[in-house]
Image (cartoon, grey):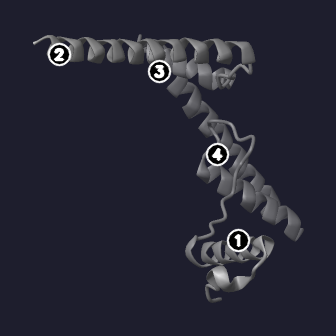
Amino acid sequence: MEWAGPEAGNNLDEYTDTVISFISFCEEVCVPVRTRKIYNNDKPWFTAQLRRLRSEKEEARRSGDKDRFKEAKYRFAKAAKEAKHRFSEKLQQQFSEGNPASVWKGLKTITNYKPKSPQTSDNLSLANELNEFYCLIASSCCLQQHLQQGINQAAKLEL
C-alpha cells in the first residue's frame, strides 16, 4: 500500500479513511502480535509444573486410555499435594520471621486481597472552586507584577 497523501480525495471523509487505513497497514506490518495464555483462577501454589501435569492428565482422559489417565491423575494429585505443602511452609516461614511486611504479604496472599483502585469524584462544583481559586492566585500574581512594573517605571521617571 502506498501513501496517497492529501491527493486521496477532496472529501474530508475520504481523506480520513485514507489516513486510518494507512495507520492500520503500518500497525499490521510493524507491531508484533503475541498470544498469551491467562490462567484466571489459579491458586498461588499452582506452579508451571502442575499446569503441565494437569494438561497431561486431561490429554490422557481425552485419549480414553484408563491406565494412562489413572497414572497421570495420580502424578498430578501427588504434585499438587506437595506444592500445597511447600506453599504452606513458605507462609509459616513468613509469619515466623517477625517481618511485618512479609506477614502482610502472606495475609494478602491467603485472603486474595487486592486493594481497589482510587476513584476520582465527578464533583463539578469542586472543580469549579479549584479553578476559581487558581485563577484568583494567577490574577493576583499578575496584578502584583503589573503594579511592581508601574512602580519601577514611576521611579525611573522621578529620577
Residue 93's mark? 3
Residue 41 against residue 36 in the figure, above or below: above
Q: How much space separates mark 2 and mark 1, taking CA atoms?
A: 62 Å
Q: Secondary structure at mark 4?
A: helix
Q: Is residue 83 above or below residue 56?
A: above
Residue type, label 4: Ala
CA distance separating discs 3 and 4: 21 Å
For label 1, the SS is helix
**Category of crowding for the residue at label 2, using alpha-carbon neighbours closer than 10 angstroms: few (below 14), some (14–19), many (at least 20):** few
Label located before the other in sequence (2 or 4): 4
Q: Is residue 118 above or below residue 38?
A: above
Looking at the image, is mark 1 or mark 4 nearer the viewer?
1
Q: Earlier in the sequence, mark 1 or mark 4?
A: 1
Query: Which tag is nearer the camera, tag 2 or tag 4?
Result: 2
Q: Which mark is residue 79?
A: 4
Give whichever of discs 3 and 1 has the lower sequence position: 1
Q: Nearer the viewer, residue 57 or 29?
A: 29
Would residue 48 appear left or right of 17 to someone viewing this image? Answer: left
Name the residue rendered at 60%, 18% in the picture. 131
Q: Which residue is mark 1?
A: 20
Q: Earlier in the sequence, mark 3 or mark 2?
A: 3
Q: Amino acid at mark 1?
A: Ile
